Image (cartoon, rainbow, N blue to C red):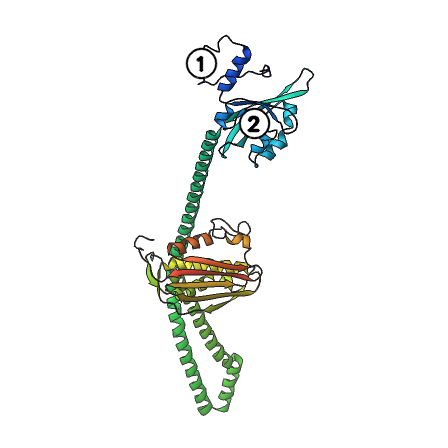
Amino acid sequence: MVNQFDEFSVLPAANAAPLPASVVGISTDARLQYLIDNTPAIIYSSVPTGDFKMTFVSNNALHVLGYHPDEMVADPNFWFEHIHPSDVPEIFSSIAKLFTEGERTYEYRFMSRSGQYVWMHDMLRLIRDKDGNPVEVVGSLTDITKRKEMEAALFKKGEEQHLLIKKLQEAHEQLLQSEKMASVGQLAAGIAHEINNPIGFINSNIGSLQNYVEKLFEVINQYEDLIQQQSPPTAVSKMDELKEKADLEFLKEDIQDLVRESMDGLKRVKDIVQSLKDFSHVGETDWQEADLHQGIDSTLNIVKNEIKYKANVVKEYGQVPLVKCIISQVNQVVMNLLVNASHAIKENGMIKISTGCEKDMAWIKVLDTGSGIPQENLNRIFEPFFTTKPVGSGTGLGLSLSYGIIKKHGGRIDVQSVMGKGTCFTVWLPLHQTNTSTES
């Protein structure tokens, strides 16, 4: 064997067998051959041009890779043909640096005799002659498969931890949002209770006022009849002058209209207050038989101001029996869908709410004629914090919370959308629940 490795040193493996007596005292070449064959790495040399054809491979290639050194040397393309195709571009793109830096280190997958890829650590060094011309590349290949497997396992564990942390964060944010909604519901119910008292006596007073005004005008009419019948012409003329000056006929009509409009306004306020109470259902966190239509109507009253300037609401209610659910949470889902539908409509449009029942499932559809949802976003709309709204305009939790609520009810939410035409959300709820005693 020629002294082609004189310019670098190779240490034997830590667990290599001691030099046998037959080797001690023999030539340096034989001694070096023994050390090379017993090192954990595969020592090789190749030409520094073309495909880097191997000119020497140490004998432990047979143990590490299953190939005999002679067959690796015989095939001029052996090295590159056995590197994993995904790893070849990186090696080719940087191999030129070997000639400027003199050393390169790579980690890549190399196919063994069994057909399995083995991770190898390859440390190359360029050998030059006395004139500086490259004459040979020497390298050492070390099996690092176990290390790579350990790194992959640690990386996977890290990803799992990261995913767990993300889920915990999402759960925390959803809990905060749910608590916020509960607080808003309690506040709304409290306000509704406080408003009910003044509304009650105002409504009573307006009713009494309406009766008083009717009696007052009745008395005035009787006075007019008596004056016309029994008073002298001068008194009748004076009375007519006073009536005209006061525009009594107009007052009679307008006062009645004012009282009627006031009564109508009070009724609307009472309806809104009742809707607040129905929507919040404070204290009602238990599963109960509920009327979905009543819940939708109360929710519509809550979000009416959000919708009325942008869309006409069309209701098409079908025959739906009472549904066992936590109605305050279902109302929250409907509210989120209605608000999103309103935001999707730029100017004027329509929001259609329809209900029905199929087998043992009730459904609620909220369809809008808005801008629609891009197809690439349809699979992400229920992700926490995902939103297409401008910064500050949405938390990205509305649909995520809705999805969680309906899933807890044993239902699902389907969505269909066409860009430029609109979106339809369908909420499916089972009519009956089982094992709900621990749900909340």
Residue in front for this viewpoint, 164 or 241: 164
The spot of residue 287 in percent (x, y) is 33, 58
Q: Which mark is residue 72?
A: 2
**Amino acid type, residue under disc 1 in the picture:** Pro
Using the image, determine if residue 172 lies above or below residue 358: above
Crowd around label 2: few <14 · some 14–19 · many ≥20 (10 Å): some
Q: Earlier in the sequence, mark 2 or mark 1?
A: 1
Question: In the image, residue 260 lies at what x, y percent?
Answer: 45, 75
**Residue 135 numbered mark, or none:** none
Position above or below: 136 against 247: above
The answer to whether mark 2 and mark 1 are in CB contact below 8 A is no
Residue appearing at x 39%, y 53% in the figure = 182
**Residue 163 falls in image quadrant:** top left
Q: Is residue 250 left or right of residue 270?
A: right
Quadrant, the N terminus: top right
Q: Nearer the viewer, residue 86 or 254?
A: 86
Q: Position of residue 53 (x, y in %)?
A: 61, 27
Q: Residue furthest top?
A: 25
Of helix, strand and loop, which one carries label 2?
A: helix
Q: Position of residue 74 (x, y in %)?
A: 59, 27
**From the viewer's perspective, is residue 108 above or below residue 335?**
above
The foreground one among 364 and 394 is 364
Hey, what amino acid is under mark 2?
Answer: Met
Residue annotated with mark 1: 18
Can see residue 401? yes
Q: Secondary structure at mark 1?
A: loop
Of the two numbered discs 2 and 1 in the rendering, the one whose residue sits closer to the viewer: 2
Snapshot quadrant of residue 150: top left
Residue occupying the point 39% across, 60% down: 429
Q: How many marks?
A: 2
